[in-house]
Image: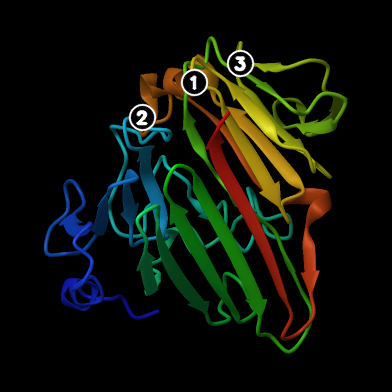
Amino acid sequence: MIKQSRQQLEQQFADIATVTIEQAPNTADDTQLLLRINHPACGALISVQGAQILRFAPTNNSDWLWLSEHADFTPGAAIRGGIPVCLPWFGVNRQNPDLPKHGVARNQPWQLVDVTETRDDICLIWRLDHVADHLFGHDFRAELSIEMGKQLSLSLTIKHLGDTTAAYSFALHSYLRANASEVEVSGLEGNTYLDNTQGLSTHTQHGNIVFDGEVDRVYANTHQAQILHTAFPRVIEGDGCPTCIVWNPGKQLGLTMADVQTGWQDYVCVERGAAFDDEVTLAPQTTLTATMTLKQL
């Protein structure tokens, strides 16, 4: 993947005054570029690496996403916060646990291929072309549409370009700003889940999810929306995203993580995707499309 230069990006935004380009903290020489959006309907911050939205707030709203104040913007390092795209596998690779966690897409620069805006919203479309290598032995193209206005919608399309079938799993790994000790998540009552704090044992969800310690759960075959119950409740909807992952490291684990530390108190992850039992097998030249939408209740 050839990284776009600042000049190339500036040319794409020549007629769009609502987008500016800046350097990521603690980096130099345009090694890590960020796009800042100041649209009449919303504000946002997006990293070229990973096509990762880091901040988002509708006008006159507080930030919906959490970005760690200790985030590492070293090129190639995972950026803690926002909505990383975990692809072409989620979590630990089940065929080879020695491979990088959460795939390769979040650690590489994506190409910005289109920008459109209206009075009500702005949409950026990104592309990642992966050539088969030692990490993932199949060619694929991923496109991510980030549409921002009064709500936030991410649509991911994966086209399998290999000559044989291949298994893909993914997640839109959303870090949602919330007081972890007070927030509750509904919309998963009665669903079974794999509990990663108990060796991926199977359990059934009873009532709302609360965060009174480490929570790391994978809910398969989930088609309903989730609600983040805060002072300003938000809805998480998924289309083509049958998996819901809910995670917060809790105090004991969070304090050991250099890019989290006390920040564990300020977010919960409620992610949509397709992982574990919902993994998707694609034949050559076939595609899958999935959309996650965040909106105010």
Alpha carbon separation for disc pair 1 and 3 = 18 Å
Nearest the viewer among 247 and 13 is 13
Instruction: Tell me if label 2 and label 3 are in contact, CB under 8 Å.
Output: no
Residue beneath label 2, please? 61
Label 2 sits on a secondary structure element that is: loop
Label 1 sits on a secondary structure element that is: loop
Give the residue type that dot 1 points to: Phe
Q: As drawn, is 202 to the left or to the right of 213? A: right
Alpha carbon separation for disc pair 2 and 3 = 24 Å
Camera sees residue 218: yes
Nearest the viewer among 26 and 54 is 54
Residue beneath label 1, please? 232
Residue beneath label 3, please? 211
Give the residue type that dot 3 points to: Phe
Instruction: Check the image and name the residue furthest to the bottom.
Output: 163
Q: As drawn, is 239 to the left or to the right of 62? A: right
Instruction: Tell me if label 2 and label 1 are in contact, CB under 8 Å.
Output: yes
Q: Residue 51: x percent and y percent?
A: 41, 60
Camera sees residue 273: no
Q: As drawn, is 87 to the left or to the right of 28? A: right
Instruction: Tell me if label 1 and label 3 are in contact, CB under 8 Å.
Output: no
Q: Does 44 sit above or below residue 112?
A: above
Q: Residue 74: x percent and y percent?
A: 27, 53
Q: Callout 3: 10 Å neighbours few (<14), some, many (20+)?
A: many
Q: Does 63 sit above or below residue 50?
A: above
Q: Earlier in the sequence, mark 2 or mark 1?
A: 2
Please tell me which residue is depicted at 63% across the width and 48% down the height of the picture. Answer: 91
Image disc number at residue 16: none
Quadrant of the drawing holding the C terminus:
top right
- Residue 240 found in image quarter: bottom right
